[in-house]
Structures are given as structure tokens and as C-alpha cells.
């Protein structure tokens, strides 16, 4: 894969043989984020879980103390009083069955997170095939299937992120922007790691955090010492 000049220059600053500690890794990732836009800083965490087993799944959500730096568009499936509550709480879109054809047939995806009241899950379930692969399906574990739509919306707008294993047992999540201070990124990262450590399935044997890498949108990955994060 051919890399751009900026990437190659930035990559020279990263020693591939070193497992950095948290503070050094964050400083280095910020330094390597040289794009003209405010790059997102992401954490990629490879776990010792085998996601094929139900008792080794990891899925949850955590509110990052400094948010993600991204404006999140929220779609809420709710009716009547709950729909009014969602609008009042600042949801970007609120609706019910009428949104199904818009999403299915018109390929409408002007939203980043979907929240639904439990009574609407029968309706939302019909969208499983389109929302599921995009990671947009509401889930009780992530707090996105709830009667308390105000709380859900407030938390998401405050910087709540969802984490889950992908098919290769890796968790990919944003922890902020390159414009954040090192302290803000460190706080967000530690909050995420604490949540993932707490979510460790009892069935997992051996080393839980196998590798932890921080990277910016356009920059090289910086590996941390996972033993220091357990």
C-alpha cells in the first residue's frame, strides 16, 4: 500500500520495536497528526476473547469525560409522549414506522446513533439487515434501548461511545480529536480502558489485552504496553 509523504515522515518518528507507555504514546500520536483537518484519535484494542462464544462477547458503552469532539446526530424511534420527550431532549430525528421505507428504500443514513423505546423494537427489528452491519442497531447493553430517552440522548451528546468486538476480536473506538490536550486524551483513554477491563468476560483465559494501538485518522499506529493497562 502506497503511503503519502506526510505519513512516511510521521512514521519515522514511531519506533515499531517499542511498546510505549500511555503518556508517550498520546504525545506521539498528537505529533503525528499533521493533516489539514482535525484528525480523530482512535484506540484499537486486540483482546484474548473468542467472540464466537457467547460467554466471551464484549459489548457496552461508556461516557468519555471530554467527549469525542464530534457532533453526533441521533435518531430516536418513539411514539406519542416519548417522541415529544425525545424532541425536547434534542434528538435530531424522531419517528416511527414511517421511517422504515426512508431508510430501506431511500438509503437514508443522516444519523450516527439510533435510540429506541422497547415498544418500538418490533419496528426497528425490520431494519436489522441494514442497521446491523453498520453497527447502528439499538441495544439494551449499550443503553440505546430504553424508556429514558432523555438520559440516553444527554449521555450520547456528552460523549458516550459504544465498544464491541469486531469479527477479529478487536475493539475500535474514537477517544477524541488531535486538537484535544494530552490530558484530555489521557482521561478519555483511561476511562475507556477501565470500562473494557471491567467488561472482561469470566470465560477468557490468559492475557486479556493482547495489543493496544493508538492512531490518528491519517497517521501511523503507536503501540502501547498492554501489561501496564491491565
Image (tube, rainbow, N blue to C red):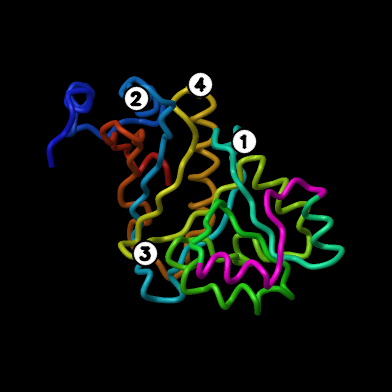
SS class, disc 3: loop
Q: Quadrant of residue 115?
A: bottom right
Tell me whether circle 1 and circle 2 mark residues in contact (CB < 8 Å).
no
Q: Which residue is mark 1?
A: 65
Disc 1/disc 2 C-alpha distance (Å): 22 Å
Figure quadrant of the N terminus: top left
> Where is residue 15 drawn, in percent x and y?
19, 28
The image shows a total of numbered marks equal to 4
> Where is residue 178 drawn, in percent x and y?
44, 26
Tell me whether circle 2 and circle 4 mark residues in contact (CB < 8 Å).
no
Q: Identify the residue at horizontal 84%, vertical 66% (top origin).
A: 80
> Where is residue 114 drawn, in percent x and y?
61, 59
Dot placed on the residue nearer the N-terminal end, 4 or 1: 1
Dot placed on the residue nearer the N-terminal end, 2 or 4: 2
Q: Identify the residue at horizontal 34%, vertical 65% (top origin).
A: 167
Dot placed on the residue nearer the N-terminal end, 1 or 3: 3
Disc 4/disc 1 C-alpha distance (Å): 13 Å
Disc 4/disc 3 C-alpha distance (Å): 32 Å
Q: Which residues are magenta?
A: 88-105
Dot placed on the residue nearer the N-terminal end, 1 or 2: 2
Disc 1/disc 3 C-alpha distance (Å): 27 Å
Disc 2/disc 3 C-alpha distance (Å): 31 Å
In this rendered view, identify the residue nearer to me: 19 or 80.
80
Above or below residue 13? Residue 1 is below
Q: Identify the residue at horizontal 38%, vertical 61% (top origin).
A: 166
Number of the front mark, 1 or 2: 2
SS class, disc 4: loop
In this rendered view, identify the residue nearer to me: 139 or 70.
70
Q: Which residue is mark 3?
A: 49
Q: Which residue is mark 4?
A: 181
> Where is residue 152 drawn, in percent x and y?
71, 53
**Crowd class of label 4 (few under 14; some 14 to 19; many from 20; radius 10 Å):** some
Amino acid at each position: 500500500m502506497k503511503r503519502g509523504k506526510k505519513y512516511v515522515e510521521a512514521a519515522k518518528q514511531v519506533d515499531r520495536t517499542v511498546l510505549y507507555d500511555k503518556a508517550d504514546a498520546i504525545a506521539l500520536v498528537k505529533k503525528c497528526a499533521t493533516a489539514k483537518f482535525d484528525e480523530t484519535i482512535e484506540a484499537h484494542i486486540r483482546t484474548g476473547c473468542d467472540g464466537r462464544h457467547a460467554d466471551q462477547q464484549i459489548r457496552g458503552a461508556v461516557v468519555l469525560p471530554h467527549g469525542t469532539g464530534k457532533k453526533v446526530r441521533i435518531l430516536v424511534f418513539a411514539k406519542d409522549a416519548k417522541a415529544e420527550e425525545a424532541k425536547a431532549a434534542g434528538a435530531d430525528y424522531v419517528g416511527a414506522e414511517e421511517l422504515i421505507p426512508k431508510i430501506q428504500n431511500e438509503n437514508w443514513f443522516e444519523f450516527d446513533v439510533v435510540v429506541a423505546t422497547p415498544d418500538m423494537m418490533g419496528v426497528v427489528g425490520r431494519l436489522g439487515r441494514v442497521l446491523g452491519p453498520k453497527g447502528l442497531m439499538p441495544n439494551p447493553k449499550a443503553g440505546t434501548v430504553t424508556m429514558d430517552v432523555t438520559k440516553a440522548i444527554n449521555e450520547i451528546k456528552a460523549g458516550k461511545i459504544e465498544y464491541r468486538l469486531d469479527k477479529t476480536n478487536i475493539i475500535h473506538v474514537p477517544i477524541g480529536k488531535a486538537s484535544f490536550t494530552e490530558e484530555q486524551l489521557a482521561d478519555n483513554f483511561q476511562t475507556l480502558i477501565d470500562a473494557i477491563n471491567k467488561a472482561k468476560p469470566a470465560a477468557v483465559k490468559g492475557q486479556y489485552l493482547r495489543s493496544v494501538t493508538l492512531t490518528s485518522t491519517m497517521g501511523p499506529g503507536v503501540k502501547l504496553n498492554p501489561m501496564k493497562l491491565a
